[in-house]
Image (cartoon, rainbow, N blue to C red):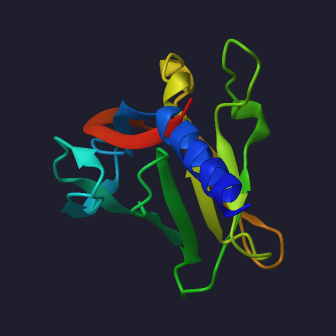
Amino acid sequence: MKALVRLALILGLGTMLASCAPVVEAHYVLSFEGVAGIQVTERRRLPQDNYILNWAVPVRYVLKRDGYALHFSMSDIASASHIIVTAKSRDGKPLRIVPRPDRKSYTPTGAICASHIFEKPGRDVMFFSWPEECSHHKDRMQLAFALKDADGNTVGDEILPFEMKWDGFIYYIDSL
């Protein structure tokens, strides 16, 4: 019986190892460099062990308007081109971020390109991602949203263009 269990484990491990392959993919980051009013506040190399040939990229931005400020930051997630957006009024109160559905873009297969995920019910922190396969929509590469105060009044409306900038490669082991 022990021999059968060992054989099954060896065959299972062998099959698993044989059906895995290293994958190297280009890595892109969302960039707001050069957008009017947006300032880069931090630039650094993303600290992933599985990066090849990457360099320092902007990871934090700020955009100050008359009644509010927007802060943009990139986390250290290697698998997604994304930005985290927070919105505060001039007096430091959180503003609600409302994505603009009229600015959606789609892949050739019909999938929506932009993804908006909110961390908490107040909707003042938004995780925005844009897959690399959507980079053919140069005219639609925009982060578009309205900002609302606690009373529901619109205090701002933003349509911010961005680019997908190449930041080297990532590698990982994938199963076939």
Direction from residue 65 to residue 11 in the image, left or right: right
Q: Name the residue: 67% across, 63% down.
A: 2
Q: In this view, does 78 lie above or below 31?
A: below
Which percent across, then down, holds residue 75? 43, 64
Which percent across, then down, holds residue 123? 73, 69
Q: In this view, does 161 lie above or below 36?
A: above
Rendered-image quadrant of the N terminus: bottom right
Say how many tags the image has. Answer: 0
Viewer-proximal residue among 107 and 41? 107
* Outermost residue to the top: 108
Viewer-proximal residue among 154 and 112? 112
Q: Name the residue: 54% across, 87% down.
A: 91
Which percent across, then down, holds residue 41? 25, 66
Q: Name the residue: 20% across, 45% down.
A: 54
Image-quadrant location for residue 40 = bottom left
Q: Is residue 29 above or below residue 4?
A: above
Direction from residue 87 to residue 54 in the image, left or right: left
Direction from residue 141 to residue 122 in the image, left or right: right
Which percent across, then down, holds residue 47? 27, 63
Image-quadrant location for residue 92 = bottom right
Viewer-proximal residue among 54 and 91? 54
Instruction: Evaluate whether residue 158 shows in this view.
Output: no
Rendered-image quadrant of the C terminus: top right
Instruction: Evaluate whether residue 85 shows in this view.
Output: yes
